Image (spheres, helix red, strand yellow):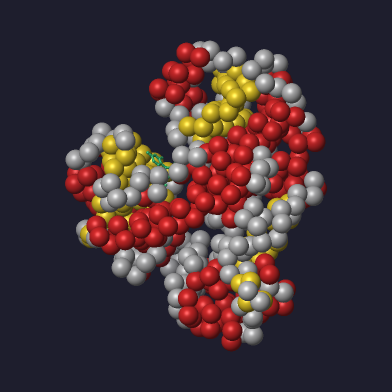
Amino acid sequence: MDAVAQEIAERVRASPLVRIVTHIDTDGITGGAIASEALDRAGITHEVAFVKKLDEPVVTELKRRGTPLVWFIDLGAGMMHALHGLDAVITDHHVPTEREIPKVLRSDLLRFAESQDRILMLNPHLEGAGSDVASGAGCAYAVAKALDPANKDLASVAIVGAVGDVQDQEFRRLSGYNREILQDGIDAGVLGAQIDLRLFGRETRPAYKMLQYATDPWIPRLSGNEDACIAFLLELGVDLKVEEHWRSWSDLELGERRRVVNALVAHMLERGCGSKEVERLIGETYTLIREPAGSPTRDAKEFGTLINACGRYHQPEVGYRVCRGDREDSLAEALRLLRGHREYLVDSMEAVAAAGINQMDAIQYFHAADTIRDTVVGIAASMALNRENAAKDMPIFAFAQASDGIKVSARTTRELVARGLDLAEVMKVASGAVGGQGGGHHAAAGATIPPGTEPKFLEIANRMVRDQIRPSRRLDGIDSR
Ligand code: C5P
Ligand code: ZN
């Protein structure tokens, strides 16, 4: 049993009241559900609060309340410097504030930092390369397991958190501590892992729709083309419907699935896709095997998307209750929010078309003003990039009004990242230069900047992107990942 998880568990057990403070995304909501379930089972009094971000006002309020113990999940690491005076435990996977970089390093997959006497943190870092070995939910799970090994059944919810944070995306499977969680879930009889088509919607979408909406990888002639997807499956002898029921991918027989996968591989290769692209069709998929077949909570990725919709529309409690097991009212409400989210995305694409995508020499952008909400503009940017009207060889920047300034989201393709593009750096520097703040990942980053600074921001971003991207001719032999 892990030492710091155990230490946190003991601290939690000794507290008369624990206030869980967690993030409103899938990872945070699932992490909050795991923590709360574990505390309930242990008979520990607690409250749960969801926050969009952990900033000074939230910290000040927590200090004012004087709760005996705060348990931060999926946040906290970036605010270590501001937490002095608070009794807190942190289960987070974000980079700790610089001057609080872990003092205690361990050689196994998890590294733990014990920063101050009154603050205990559990936080994984993989040497040099990203931090996808565990999610906030996964770290909360480690504490739940330390509280009681019988909590291993909560591994399924932790995997939803990891997948919600796309920790399986880069390598097409989970890695690091996430694999230990996965094994716990398999042992506990709540999880299954299988190599399968990675496309979204294995349980709930008609199989042809799953192909039609494919973006990772993008399938030439099929992605975005309903008729072609229907014809593709029919030609392979796959029945699309049984009576009135559209067959989902999970409804297909193993032989049918194999046939479709082989045909997709051949189809992509024949149309000039490289093996790296084709490879992305297949990967490890995660199933919550106690959930009914065809339900929105059976496939981990679909479950994560459902929970995310709740957070985005300011109803994290709804997602939280689904994670805690409510398959009645909360599930119905979550599905309503997800449907609303999908409709909102359709409207957002119209808003992008109305705003128009402008090009500079190295970047493209649109300004949605108040037509797309700040929590959705990032997805709108991804979707716009996947459409015909956007250039594929440029990152896209999207602006939208937010309560605290102008929200910027930037997205790009794997190809440009391989050629040197780092949007996290661009966002950090360009937003910092205009008095805002931002960061994120190489291929997806965000920022908030003061209203009116967009032109200056764009000018800096354009220059930085131009400088970062190597000409594609040099790609051969430099980086084939
Ligand atoms: O909001 P959006 O989806 O565009 O964010 C993409 C990434 O950028 C996220 O990982 C988020 O944590 C990061 N981000 C950031 N600072 C911001 C906004 C987003 O580091 N102000
Ligand atoms: Zn997270």
Res. 355 image quadrant: bottom left
Q: Is residue 386 left or right of residue 368?
A: right
**Residue 48 percent coordinates (x, y):** 58, 28
**Which is nearer the eye, 291 or 268?**
291
Res. 125 image quadrant: top right
Residue 338 in sight here:
yes
**Which is nearer the eye, 475 or 414?**
414
**Residue 350 percent coordinates (x, y):** 31, 61
Residue at figure coordinates x 52%, y 78% from the top left: 229
Residue at figure coordinates x 70%, y 25% from the top left: 9
Q: Would you place residue 418 above or below residue 213 in this image?
A: above
How many marks on residues?
A: 0
Q: Would you place residue 177 above or below residue 278 in this image?
A: above
Residue at figure coordinates x 40%, y 23% from the top left: 56
Residue at figure coordinates x 76%, y 36% from the top left: 151
Q: In this view, does 426 lie to the left or right of 219?
A: left
Residue 166 in sight here:
no
Q: Would you place residue 417 above or below residue 326 in this image?
A: below
Q: Is residue 271 left or right of residue 71?
A: left
**Residue 33 percent coordinates (x, y):** 63, 36
Q: Quadrant of the N terminus?
A: top right
